[in-house]
Amino acid sequence: MSGDFPVALIPILGAALIPFLRGGLRSAWMLLLPVIAFGYLLAIPHGLHGEVELLGQTLVLMRVDKLSLLFGYIFLLALLLSVIYALHVKDVSQHVAGMVYAGSAIGAVFAGDLMSLFLYWELTAVTSVLLVWARRGEHSAAVGMRYVIIQLLSGMFLLAGSLLHWHDTGSFAFGHIGLSGTAGLLILIAFGIKSAFPFLHNWLMDAYPEATPSGTVFLSAFTTKLGIYALARGFAGTEELIWIGTLMAAFPIFYAVIENDLRRVLAYSMNNQLGFMVVGIGIGTELAINGAVAHAFADIIFKGLLFMSMGAVLLRAGTIKGSELGGLYKSMPWTTGFCIVGAASISAFPLFSGFVTKSMIMSAAAMEGLTFNWLVLLFASAGVFHHAGIKIPYFAFFAHDSGIRCAEAPKNMLAAMGIAAALCIGIGVFPGILYGLLPYAPDYEPYTASHIVAQLQLLFFSALAFAVLMRTGIYPPELKSVNLDSDWFYRRAMPAVTAVCRRALRQARAGLREALQKRLAAPGAALARQMQPGGMLLRSWPTGSMSLWVMVMLLAHLALYYLG
Amino acid sequence: MTDDKKRHWLDSSANVTKLYKGLWIACGLLISIDLFLHRHEDFEFAMLFGFHGIYGFFACVALVLAAKQLRKLLMRPEDYYDRKPHER
């Protein structure tokens, strides 16, 4: 089968039909689209397909290799799960936006050149914001605006970097770019915004918790992992990424401990997981790259699962604040169980997916002798269990009974969570299937006695720390609050600075006017006198003097003409 | 809902204490494996007795204590960003 047809167009064009379908037919169509696309990916051969000549440049719409296929598969899987999870949603715009958003992320993954990457990159931005705005209301309008400005900014960096790259190399081909020169730096910033690098990260914690319950599940799968894919493609082995990733893995967990909105806690823990992947890409060895992309694969599923469970809680209990929840396991036992599977996976318990993927990155870091980074990552591993593995299920489903009694999640949500949970365990128990899809031939065995014991010790003692802190009352309670993060700079500091500037300008203008008025008062009064009856300007002039002045002017013109 | 009257196993604080004690026992057993198993690690220090357990415990305690202090610096009322400048 020829692979010239861009796989992205299957969901993107297919989405156009969604508004015209009703009921079961619409559901069937939405479920069918990712399945068709998946079948298509299985059928086409590796290589460059869909090459289009445009303005003397070759655009490659379908670059099919192991790396793009891995992300293609997982994006389609995530799309299928998200569609199932969102089946009960009546709002058609969300279905269309989610489908086109997923399609454009898939298009970006298969784009073989920077121009088509840019087009899909921007399309993910404008379609994903619709999922934030779908929550409706003034608040989500503002959040969505902040989100889309930052996403489009990332696109602008990508465009500028791509044009410079073209200028430097004469080609738009998207291969290894590396951090040499301005072009590389601009493109790295573009990818860094999507992957939520430190200080470029806050759109993630700002927007994801504000989308609709199902919208956040869509969002969690694509944008950041597209960033990771692009980094793996363009910046593998860029040493700076090791440090950026280490910082990313560590600092969000402090926020996650004190954050009250449980979906925001997940956004912070997502940032922390992205840090692990960025470290892997920075190390750049075969094991490290394998680990980074495998962890992205696993993360899409378990983070999706955690967001699904919290979305179900938001839908049923009407709130997602840790301070208002508790005891929900009585009302939502299935959701509780699925959430715990997701929590065990992100915490990398043996037999769950995170265990077989994250450990590759840890091993790669250890092999390179990165002692400090390894210790920080180990700290982050304990921390992620602490805040995502324990805090999320504990405060939502256990803790003190909030008295909230609600219905279990809708059946379609439970189905999506059930499949995701099965996949988490499946990958953990049979890692060979995922390992076979990785870009490099895998030479890694996760299940050694040493590794299992070490990991269990780490996790059980982290749990013990949580329990001890809880029982001694040292653990900080969940409080209604917001915590300042880097968004403070553009939500508070910058408006404050512009307000000060505006006030200063206003005062300067007023002062200037006053000074001028004072200075011009005397000549103004003299002028006003001439405008009164008897003044020079109100006198009647004889026609003769008029023609005299005309003659003077004509003579002056003549004189100037000769002089010129 | 129907489960309102049902008393759950976790509702009893005695059972929660049982769980808590169980966790201590599990940790004790896990760390004692280090007495028999010679763990293969890439770093020398990671082979020390109970390294991962002790590191995990203190990492989490440090994390929580640090985050608690961080709250003093970073925590604001829930409607912080919605307030007009003169209300702040």
Image (cartoon, helix red, strand yellow):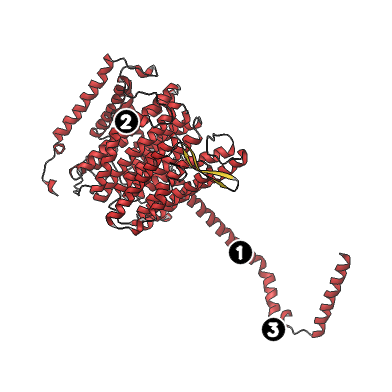
Asked if residue A167 shows in the view, the reply is yes
Asked if residue A197 shows in the view, the reply is no
Q: Quadrant of residue A532?
A: bottom right
Task: Indicate which disc residue A513 carries.
Answer: 1
Q: Label 2 is found on which chain of the structure?
A: A
Q: Compare marks 1 and 2 and give the one earlier in the sequence.
A: 2
Q: Quadrant of residue A139?
A: bottom left
Q: Label 3 is found on which chain of the structure?
A: A
Label 3 neighbour load within 10 Å: few <14, some 14-19, many 20+:
few
Helix, strand or loop for disc 3: loop
Horizontal side, residue A60 vs residue A44: left or right: right
Task: Indicate which disc residue A376 carries.
Answer: none
| The N terminus of chain A sits in image quarter | top left
Task: Indicate which disc residue A348 carries.
Answer: 2
Horizontal side, residue A174 vs residue A460: left or right: right
The residue under label 3 is A533
Q: Quadrant of residue A419?
A: top left
